[in-house]
Image (cartoon, rainbow, N blue to C red):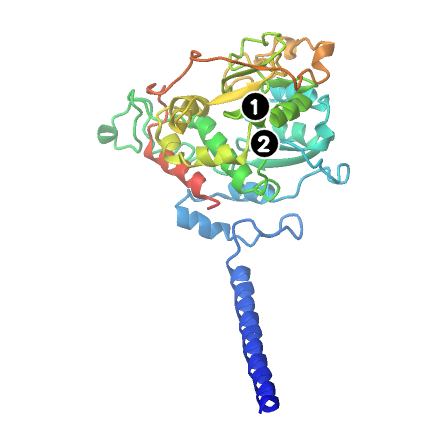
C-alpha cells in the first residue's frame, strides 16, 4: 500500500510544480510585453545619433499641454538625445566622479573665460561636463564644441523664449506690454504684483534653470540614475584649478562634519568675498556660485514645484532663498572651504555682454589671481567646522521682485516639473 501511494504523491507534486512553472513563465512573458510597450521616459539607449527614443515626445507635449513646438525647437530636442562627445578620448569616467553642469545664456566672452579656467582644473578629465544652453546661439555652440579636455554633453532648452520668435514662450503680437490693462488693450497676459507684464528675455532665466534641473536629474540617460552630488556653475564663474579636488573632499567630509548641510559650495555665499583663510571648514547659507547637492536634496526641491513656479520673482536663486529653502523646516546650510575655489566675475546682466564692444569684461579678459595654493587641494580632513548663523540675505517673507506674474509662465514651469514623471 505504501509503495502504491508514494508514486501518486510524487506525480501530484510534479503536476503542481509544472503548473507553477508554466504560470510563472506566462506572467514573465506578460511582464516583458508590458515593459516593451510602456517603457519609462528615456529608458532605452540610443542605437544611433538622432534615432527616436521609446518615449513619444509628441504625446508628452499633448498630455502636458506644452506650447506647440516649431521646427527649430524639435531639432533642439533631437540634439539633446545625442550621446556625449569625446567618448573616444575619455572612454571611462572615474567611479566617484562628480558631474559638472555649466548653464549658459548668450555671453560668449564670458564663456571663453570659464571654459579656459575649466581646462586647467585638476581632475576635469575624470568626469562628465554638461553644458545647458538657454536656446541656441551659434557662437556659444562653437565655443563649447571646441572643448576637448573632458567628456562633454550639450543640451538646449527647447522651450526657451529665444527659440520662439512670434509666440509664447517668446513674444506674440497679442501679448500685453509693460503696464497694459488687458481689458482695455484686449491683450493677453497677467501682470506681476507691481503691475508689469512679462518680459521673455527676463523670465527665460528662471525657466532655463528649472528646465535644466528637471532634465539633468530626471531626464538625461547619463544622469537620471545618478544619486550622488552634481556641481552647477554658470558662464560667469571662474573656476580655480583645485575646485574639483576640493569639492570631492567636501562631499566626502559632509556626512560626518556637517550632517545637516544640504550642499557643498566652491565659494562664499557673499560673492564679494574670497574666504576667511582659517584652518577650518565653513557652514553657511547656500550660495549660488559653484553649488553641488545630491538627489535626496533634489527630491525635496522638486517636491516644492508649485511654490517655485508661483513665486513672483524671475530670479531662480531668490525664489529658492525666499520660498523653497525655508520650507525645508530647518536652516539650509552648505559646506565650503575657508578659501574660495570659484569666483563670480560678471560685471553686467544676464542678457548683456554679447558683443565685442559691450562684453562687460575689461579689455576682453579677466584678471583673477591664482596662487600656488589654489592649484592643489587645500582642504584638510582634520579641520573643524565654523558655523555662520543668522546671515543677512533673502529669507521667508520676502515678496519677490516680480516679473513672474503671467499664468502661462506658471503653467510652463509646472509642466517642466512633470515632464519625466
Residue 414 pos. (x, y %) = 40, 38
Would you place residue 77 above or below residue 310 in this image? below
Q: Is residue 76 visible?
A: yes
**First reached walking from the N terminus: tag 2 or tag 1:** 2
The foreground one among 309 and 377 is: 377
Give the farthest residue toward the left: 184
The foreground one among 343 and 385 is: 385
For residue 256, which quarter of the picture? top right
Q: CA distance from mark 2 to mark 1?
A: 9 Å
Q: Is residue 303 left or right of residue 17?
A: left
- Check the picture and name the quadrant holding the N terminus: bottom right
Residue 193 pos. (x, y %) = 29, 22
Would you place residue 167 above or below residue 192 in this image? below
- Disc 2 to disc 1: CB gap under 8 Å: yes
Mark number displayed over residue 318: none
User: Residue visible at 56% across and 36% down?
Assistant: 156
Categorize mark 1 by other alpha carbons within 10 Å: few (<14), some (14-19), many (20+): many
Q: Is residue 167 visible?
A: no
Residue picked out by circle 2? 229
Residue picked out by circle 1? 264
SS under mark 2: loop
Categorize mark 2 by other alpha carbons within 10 Å: few (<14), some (14-19), many (20+): many
For residue 337, which quarter of the picture? top right
User: Residue visible at 61% across and 24% down?
Assistant: 253
Residue 79 pos. (x, y %) = 60, 42
Residue 217 pos. (x, y %) = 54, 38
User: Residue visible at 68% across and 8% down?
Assistant: 369
The foreground one among 255 and 4 is: 4
SS under mark 1: strand
Give the farthest residue toward the right: 89
Give the farthest residue toward the front: 1
Amino acid at each position: 500500500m505504501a509503495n502504491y501511494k508514494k508514486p501518486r504523491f510524487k506525480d501530484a507534486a510534479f503536476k503542481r510544480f509544472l503548473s507553477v512553472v508554466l504560470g510563472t513563465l506566462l506572467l514573465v512573458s506578460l511582464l516583458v510585453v508590458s515593459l516593451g510597450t510602456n517603457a519609462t521616459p528615456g529608458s532605452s539607449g540610443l542605437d544611433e545619433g538622432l534615432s527616436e527614443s521609446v518615449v513619444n515626445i509628441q504625446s508628452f507635449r499633448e498630455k502636458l499641454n506644452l506650447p506647440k513646438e516649431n521646427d527649430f525647437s524639435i531639432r533642439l530636442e533631437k540634439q539633446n538625445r545625442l550621446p556625449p562627445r569625446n567618448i573616444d578620448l575619455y572612454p571611462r569616467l572615474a567611479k566617484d566622479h562628480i558631474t559638472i553642469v555649466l548653464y549658459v545664456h548668450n555671453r560668449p566672452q564670458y564663456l571663453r573665460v570659464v571654459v579656459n579656467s575649466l581646462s586647467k582644473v585638476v581632475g576635469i578629465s575624470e568626469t562628465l561636463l554638461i553644458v545647458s544652453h538657454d536656446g541656441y546661439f551659434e557662437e556659444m555652440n562653437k565655443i563649447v564644441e571646441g572643448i576637448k579636455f573632458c567628456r562633454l554633453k550639450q543640451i538646449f532648452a527647447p522651450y526657451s523664449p529665444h527659440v520662439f520668435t512670434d509666440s509664447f514662450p517668446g513674444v506674440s503680437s497679442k501679448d500685453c506690454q509693460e503696464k497694459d490693462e488687458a481689458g482695455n488693450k484686449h491683450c493677453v497676459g497677467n501682470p506681476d504684483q507691481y503691475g508689469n507684464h512679462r518680459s521673455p528675455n527676463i523670465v527665460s532665466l528662471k525657466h532655463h534653470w528649472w528646465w535644466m534641473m528637471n532634465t539633468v536629474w530626471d531626464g538625461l540617460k547619463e544622469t537620471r540614475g545618478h544619486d550622488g552630488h552634481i556641481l552647477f556653475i554658470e558662464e560667469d564663474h571662474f573656476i580655480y584649478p583645485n575646485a574639483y579636488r576640493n569639492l570631492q573632499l567636501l562631499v566626502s567630509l559632509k556626512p560626518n562634519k556637517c550632517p545637516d548641510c544640504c550642499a557643498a559650495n566652491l565659494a562664499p555665499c557673499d560673492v564679494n568675498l574670497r574666504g576667511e583663510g582659517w584652518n577650518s571648514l565653513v557652514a553657511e547659507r547656500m550660495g549660488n556660485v559653484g553649488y553641488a547637492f545630491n538627489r535626496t536634496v533634489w527630491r525635496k526641491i522638486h517636491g516644492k514645484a508649485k511654490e517655485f513656479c508661483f513665486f513672483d520673482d524671475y530670479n531662480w536663486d531668490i525664489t529658492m532663498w525666499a520660498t523653497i529653502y525655508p520650507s525645508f523646516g530647518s536652516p539650509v546650510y552648505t559646506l565650503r572651504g575657508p578659501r574660495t575655489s570659484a569666483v563670480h566675475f560678471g560685471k553686467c546682466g544676464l542678457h548683456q555682454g554679447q558683443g565685442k564692444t559691450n562684453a562687460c569684461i575689461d579689455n576682453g579678459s579677466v584678471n583673477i589671481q591664482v596662487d600656488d595654493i589654489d592649484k592643489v587641494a587645500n582642504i584638510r580632513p582634520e579641520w573643524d567646522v565654523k558655523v555662520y548663523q543668522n546671515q543677512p540675505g533673502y529669507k521667508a517673507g520676502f515678496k519677490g521682485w516680480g516679473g513672474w506674474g503671467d499664468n502661462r509662465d506658471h503653467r510652463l514651469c509646472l509642466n517642466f516639473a512633470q515632464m519625466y514623471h
